């Protein structure tokens, strides 16, 4: 009887809340979720990695970084 009179309350209300939270999470949360991160500036990340590995000199690193940041 209670279930038929207030069919949007109880577990139905719980599931509505779950679906609303899920939809908000899908469409509002930015995609910078740990584990799924995509770098916002991949060029600088690649440059940092090359410098850390010793593939480029400090001068070349600073020159290229300045060029990338101008964009």
Image (spheres, helix red, strand yellow):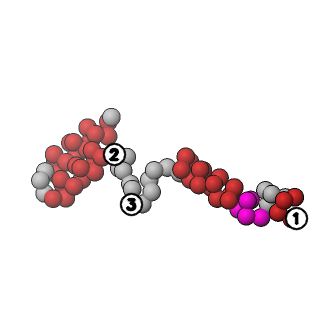
Callout 3: helix, strand or loop? loop
Residue 53 belongs to the span the image colors magenta: no
Q: CA distance from mark 2 to mark 1?
A: 59 Å
Instruction: Determine which residue is flagged by label 3.
Output: 35
Q: Residue at x 79, y 60 (%)?
A: 9
**Nearest-to-viewer mark from 3 and 1:** 1
Front-most of residues 33 and 16:
16
Q: Position of residue 16 (x, y in %)?
A: 69, 55
The range drawn in magenta is: 10-14
Q: Earlier in the sequence, mark 3 or mark 2?
A: 3
**Nearest-to-viewer mark from 3 and 2:** 3
Question: Would you identify the image quadrant in which residue 69 lies?
Answer: top left
Please give left or right for residue 22 compared with residue 34 in the image: right
Please give left or right for residue 26 compared with residue 40 in the image: right
Q: Residue at x 59, y 50 (%)?
A: 23
Q: CA distance from mark 3 to mark 1?
A: 47 Å
Instruction: Determine which residue is flagged by label 2.
Output: 41
Q: Residue at x 87, y 64 (%)?
A: 1
Instruction: Determine which residue is flagged by label 1.
Output: 1
Residue 13 belongs to the span the image colors magenta: yes
* 3 and 2 marks in contact (CB < 8 Å): no
């Amino acid at each position: 009887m209670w279930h038929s009179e207030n069919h949007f309350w109880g577990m139905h209300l719980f599931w509505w809340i779950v679906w609303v939270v899920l939809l908000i999470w899908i469409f509002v949360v930015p995609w910078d979720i740990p584990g799924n991160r995509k770098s916002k500036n991949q060029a600088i990340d690649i440059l940092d990695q090359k410098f850390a590995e010793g593939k480029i000199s400090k001068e070349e690193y600073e020159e290229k970084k300045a060029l990338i940041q101008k964009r």
